[in-house]
Image: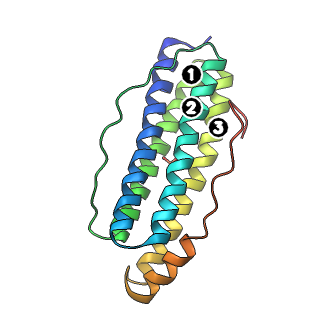
Amino acid sequence: MLSQKLQDALNKQINEEYYSSYLYTAMVAYMESLNLDGCAHWMKMQAEEEHQHAHKIFTYMVDRGGRVELQAVKAPPQEWDSPVEAFKAALEHEEFMTRNINALADLAQSEHDHATNNLMQWYVTEQVEEEANVDDILKKLEMVGGSGQGLFMIDRELMTRPAPAPLTEGGAA
Ligand code: OFO
């Protein structure tokens, strides 16, 4: 059985993952407003992946006999100064999410809840990828000065991001 403290922390993380999905969806709208179809596509795939992240914790809590309690998702920003600034905000957000996951793993370990710790280790690994993916795009955008033909090429490349593969439920990847 999940402790109340862990249950509250997992419910909060579900909310953060839904917020992530909402944030990236706001970035889809922003990129669409600039006619950057590839950037918009990449953000859309990211938003879908975040939805999966929320659902994975949801299913895990149900499996453990916990009670999922959905909270209000706050409104994301709507505008950024440039595509570079949007990807910078995405990277900062992923760093924030990594800190949340690490805190959850610490809590699970302090409670000797091995199953929750196991689930959190999946997210720890996932966060390495999340940060690296955004950082890679950000560096490329900065390399081309965030505009002109370079931006056009990167936008085309981002259009090739595949849809996220379905995750298995619960603790396994
Ligand atoms: Fe769920 O990893 Fe990004 O936020």
Q: Which residue is mark 3?
A: 121
Q: Which residue is mark 1?
A: 110
| Whole-percent x, y for residue 36 in the image | 42, 73
Count all numbered tags in the image, as a single digit. 3
Residue drawn at 44 percent across, 89 percent down: 149
Residue drawn at 42 percent across, 52 percent down: 25
Local crowd at mark 2 within 10 Å, few (<14), some, or many (≥20)? many
- Between 117 and 15, the one nearer to me in the picture: 15
Instruction: Work out which quarter of the rendered image holds the N terminus and state it.
Output: top right
In contact (CB < 8 Å): disc 3 and disc 2: yes
Could you tell me how far apart the alpha carbons at marks 1 and 2 are, in whole angstroms?
A: 9 Å
Task: Give the number of the disc on residue 65.
Answer: none
Could you tell me how far apart the alpha carbons at marks 3 and 2 are, in whole angstroms?
A: 7 Å
Find numbered disc 1 in the image and state the secondary structure of the residue it sits on.
helix
Local crowd at mark 1 within 10 Å, few (<14), some, or many (≥20)? few
- Mark 2 CB lies closer than 8 A to ligand 1: no
| Whole-percent x, y for residue 144 in the image | 43, 84
Q: Who comes first in sequence, dot 1 or dot 3?
A: 1
Please state which amino acid type lies under the numbered disc 1.
Ser
- Mark 1 CB lies closer than 8 A to ligand 1: no
Residue 112 visible here = no
Please state which amino acid type lies under the numbered disc 3.
Gln
